[in-house]
Amino acid sequence: MTAYQTPRLTVDLVPRQFWRSSLAEQMPADQWQECRGWTFKRDEFRCRACGSESDLECDEIWSYDGNVRRLDGLQALCSPCHAVKHLGRTVHRGDPDAAMRHLMRVNDWSRAEAVRHRDEALVLFKERNRVEFVSTDTSWLLAWLGIEFHV
Ligand SMILES: [Zn+2]
């Protein structure tokens, strides 16, 4: 790698406390469909990481600040990129080797670079698991889509 750049695709492991508590799992189906539709349209029906137009899914972008989980946005990702993003889930329910190869391809990384990034994500995951998050901020939904939803 010549110079540091923000990678196109990153691994972002959801803290254990929030497994099975995504918006997709918690919102009423019609509201979630509205979120997906809005996101796909804004992203012009392309994966934001690799540009693919097939097998699009709606990725939830969360940040963790102190003991607050905050929704920072939604983005269209193709299924292979989404499997990289949530590599922890992919280990249990998918093909983690294929996900690592996809991460290498999208970011033009060597295996060593991909493994280093994955290991850094794992360290962050362990740090986040030590925090007890007490609230979830979903005000982004209200600001951008006019949807009021609290968890
Ligand atoms: Zn993609």
Image: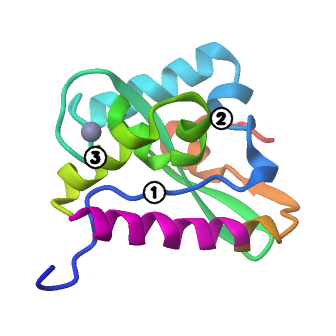
Q: Is residue 137 above or below residue 47?
A: below
**Whether residue 142 can be seen here:** yes
Q: Give the spatial CA distance, label 1 vs label 2.
A: 19 Å
Camera-nearest label, 3 or 1: 3
Camera-nearest label, 3 or 2: 3
What's the residue type where badge 2 is placed? Leu
Mark 2 neighbour class, 10 Å CA radius: few under 14, some 14 to 19, many 20 or more = some
**Whether residue 78 can be seen here:** no
- Mark 3 highlights which residue? 101
Q: Give the spatial CA distance, label 3 vs label 2.
A: 28 Å
Residues 15 and 104: in front is 104
What's the residue type where badge 1 is placed? Val
Q: Which residues are magenta?
A: 110-126
Q: Are marks 3 and 1 in contact (CB under 8 Å)?
A: no
Closer to the N terminus: mark 3 or mark 2? 2
In percent of the image, x 41 and y 28: which residue is there? Answer: 57
Ligand 1 found in image quarter: top left
Quadrant the N terminus occupies: bottom left
Camera-nearest label, 1 or 2: 1
Q: Are marks 1 and 2 in contact (CB under 8 Å)?
A: no
Q: Are marks 3 and 2 in contact (CB under 8 Å)?
A: no
Residue 9 belongs to magenta span: no
Q: Which mark is residue 23?
A: 2
- Residue 52 found in image quarter: top left
Mark 1 neighbour class, 10 Å CA radius: few under 14, some 14 to 19, many 20 or more = many
- Residue 134 found in image quarter: bottom right
Q: Position of residue 91 (x, y in %)?
A: 56, 40
- Mark 1 highlights which residue? 11
